Amino acid sequence: MAYHTLLKFPDPRLKEVSSTVKEFDVELVGCVNDLYDTLNVEFGAGIAAPQIGRLVRVVLVKCSSFGELSPDPYELDEDILVLINPVIGLLGNKVRWSEACLSVPDTSGEVYRSSSINVKYQDIGGIYHELSVGWPLAGAIQHECDHLDGVLYIDRMPISESAKIRRAAYATTKRITSLSKGSQRQSYIAPKVKSKKRPPKKFGKLKKKKKK
Ligand SMILES: [Zn+2]
């Protein structure tokens, strides 16, 4: 078990489509445990394997972050739902809510999600299951499963709303790259002053607006 550094947007690996898990072996258990450790260290509400650079179809959701019990408690922590090879059927109405993501740090944005879902998946032993999930856990699962297809919540926002987030992320990446290459300039580049504002929740429990 180990913590892994998270990939951050605009890392191109976050755009990749992840592979189906075929072997339910020690390596898979290791992957799930690494995701679990990373989720806890980052105080996240959910995580998908591609976020730590493993391009396999595995997601974890911390159900208490959404005020719910795990419908299929994980043996190491009954608060956790582990989904291997999840396939989602979208049901219900569209709900607009605020999301954030460990891979798009220090920001959040509003997206539409289906209010309920049906999810077919395998557990860590390869056994097939099916669940009906309501709001808001359904929204969290949709967010995490999007990662498996290379989709971030900002990809679901109108470009006019996500542009600011994208620009800030590209600017940060450029700054880090130029600093790591060693700038020839004599002047000191002051780092951005970090806001004292509390970072947004890793997921929105904030607003729930029904689409009119
Ligand atoms: Zn995410």
Image (tube, rainbow, N blue to C red):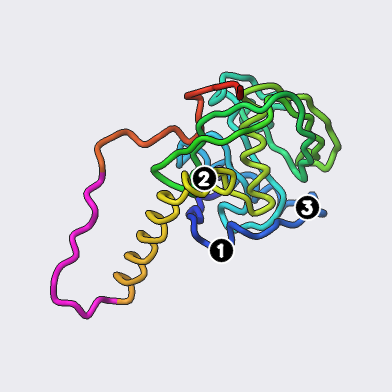
Query: Quick one: SS at disc 3?
Result: loop
Query: Do labels 1 and 2 touch, CB within 8 Å?
Result: no
User: Magenta residues: mostly which secondary structure?
Assistant: loop
Tell me if the residue at label 1 has its CB under 8 Å from ligand 1: no
Ranked by sequence position, the earlier of labels 2 and 3 is 3
Ranked by sequence position, the earlier of labels 1 and 2 is 1
Q: Which mark is residue 21?
A: 3
Quadrant holding the C terminus: top right
How many other residues sit within 10 Å of disc 3, few (<14), some (14-19) or many (≥20)? some
Horizontal side of 9 relative to 49 (left or right) equals left
Looking at the image, residue 164 lies above or below residue 141: below
Quadrant of ligand 1: it is top right
Q: CA distance from mark 1 to mark 2?
A: 20 Å
Name, please, the residue furthest toward the bottom.
Answer: 184
Q: Residue at x 65, y 22 (%)?
A: 135
The one nearer the camera, 205 or 211, is 211
Query: Quick one: SS at disc 1?
Result: helix
Q: Amino acid at mark 1?
A: Pro
Query: Residue 153 in magenta?
Result: no
Q: Amino acid at mark 3?
A: Val
Query: Quick one: SS at disc 2?
Result: helix
Looking at the image, residue 84 lies above or below residue 91: below
Q: Amino acid at mark 2?
A: Thr
Horizontal side of 126 relative to 114 (left or right) equals right
Which tag is nearer the camera, tag 1 or tag 2? Answer: 1
- Name the residue tied to disc 1: 12
Q: Residue at x 58, y 42 (%)?
A: 47
In the image, which residues are magenta?
182-194
Q: CA distance from mark 2 to mark 3?
A: 20 Å
Looking at the image, residue 175 lies above or below residue 154: below
- Name the residue tied to disc 2: 38
Residue 94 is situated, as x and y percent measured from the top left of the image, at 66, 28
